[in-house]
Each structure stands twice: as C-alpha cells, then as structure tokens.
Image: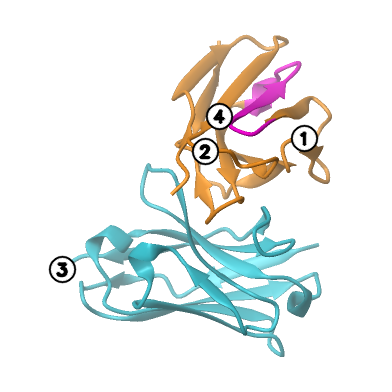
Amino acid sequence: DTVLTQSPALAVSPGERVSISCRASEGVNSYMHWYQQKPGQQPKLLIYKASNLASGVPARFSGSGSGTDFTLTIDPVEADDTATYFCQQSWNDPTFGGGTKLELK
Amino acid sequence: EVQLVESGGVLVQPGRSMKLSCAASGFTFSSFPMAWVRQAPTKGLEWVATISTSGGSTYYRDSVKGRFTISRDNAKSTLYLQMDSLRSEDTATYYCTTQAAISYWFAYWGQGTLVTVSS
C-alpha cells in the first residue's frame, strides 16, 4: 500500500496562511486529492488531481505538488475552516493520510 | 443536487452478515463508478471497494476480499455492500461515494451509516 503521511495537527490565527503537507511513500504522479471533514459530517472534496479546485470550493483553498510531496494551502484562513483535512492518492489502490486537524487560535 | 443516502447499519455479532444500501439521486447513477469508504470511530478513512458503471468490474481492499461484495442496481439507482464473516475491526461508519472514473477521486459522499460488530 502507498502510505501517506500528514502532520497530526496545526493551529493558526484567522487571516493567516496555512500549508498542510502530505508525503507519499512512493510516487503518485498528480493523483493526489484533498478532503475536509468537520466533526459529525462526511468528508467533502476540496482539491482533485493535486491542484484542481472542486466545484463550489472557495478560491482560498489551493493545492500543489507532484510525485511524493503535496501541499494544501488555505489563504486566508477563516473560522469556518476548523476541520480535519485528509489527503488521498488514487495512483494505486486508494489510500488516505491520517489527517491533519486544523485548529484556530 | 447529488444525494446519497446510506442505510442498513446496525449492531451485529462477529461472524454474522449484513447488507448496506445507498440510494442515489440528482445525477445519472449508471454513468459513474461508485465506492464504499469507511471510517472507524475517531480514526482515519479507509477505501473498501469500488464498482464500475455496469457492475462488471469490482475492486476490493485486501482485508475484505472474499468477505464483502459490492454491487449495484442501475435501474433502482442503488449501491449495495454485502458484508459476510464480519469482524470487530469492520466496525466503522460506511460512506457511499461517487467516483468520476475508476482510480479517480471520491467526488460526493453520503452521510454514512454506522456498522458495529460486537458480541
């Protein structure tokens, strides 16, 4: 399985820029996707194929990377962005990262 | 508006079987591959199975191969997951999801249904 590694948690202040990283154990081309999950809710697609914004997602969210290193950026962060963010690769059998919990100061 | 509504999640004893359903609406169900993704309590996400548009091709994670069967009824716009020989480690919320194509991202998600395997 392709293992995806994310930092467990981040804390930022509203209005700041935050970057959430995801590292793959092997190259996944650009087949990396990002999801937001708020407590008690289902995940929501934010970014597909590394850098494409999903329909209805604010332009404050962006994605970058290829190969093994990927980044989700939120700029500026808003209070409503408090959530856990998961990366997922689909180059091989789908796997997810462990999630990064974003908290606001 | 895309809607995916899962049902069938209950408390079941280890070794028993159960079947989940997912009723889809708001899109052309027969045009999209579908998948099940699960999330154990307070844990991360785990892909379970994917089915092609016609149902002719299915894909499973190793830990459920031979125990779970994904299927679909395009006439009823419904996705299923038959789960046999259930284990405690299968305890999770199971989400029904759409895929743009096989090996793509999970575009839309249902609200999930909780399966608890315990004696």
Report the chain shown in orange: A
Q: Are marks 3 and 2 in contact (CB under 8 Å)?
A: no
First in residue order: circle 4 vs circle 1: 4
Asked if marks 3 and 2 fall on the same chain, the answer is: no
Kindly identify which chain the residue marked by label 1 belongs to: A
Residue type at numbered disc 1: Ser
Q: Judging from the image, what secondary structure is the residue with disc 1 in?
A: loop
Q: Judging from the image, what secondary structure is the residue with disc 3 in?
A: loop
Number of dots carrying numbers: 4
The residues colored magenta run A66-81
| Residue hosting label 1 | A51
Asked if marks 4 and 3 fall on the same chain, the answer is: no
- In the rendered image of the structure, the colour used to display chain B is cyan
> Which x, y percent locates residue A4?
49, 37
| Residue hosting label 2 | A26
Q: CA distance from mark 4 to mark 1?
A: 13 Å
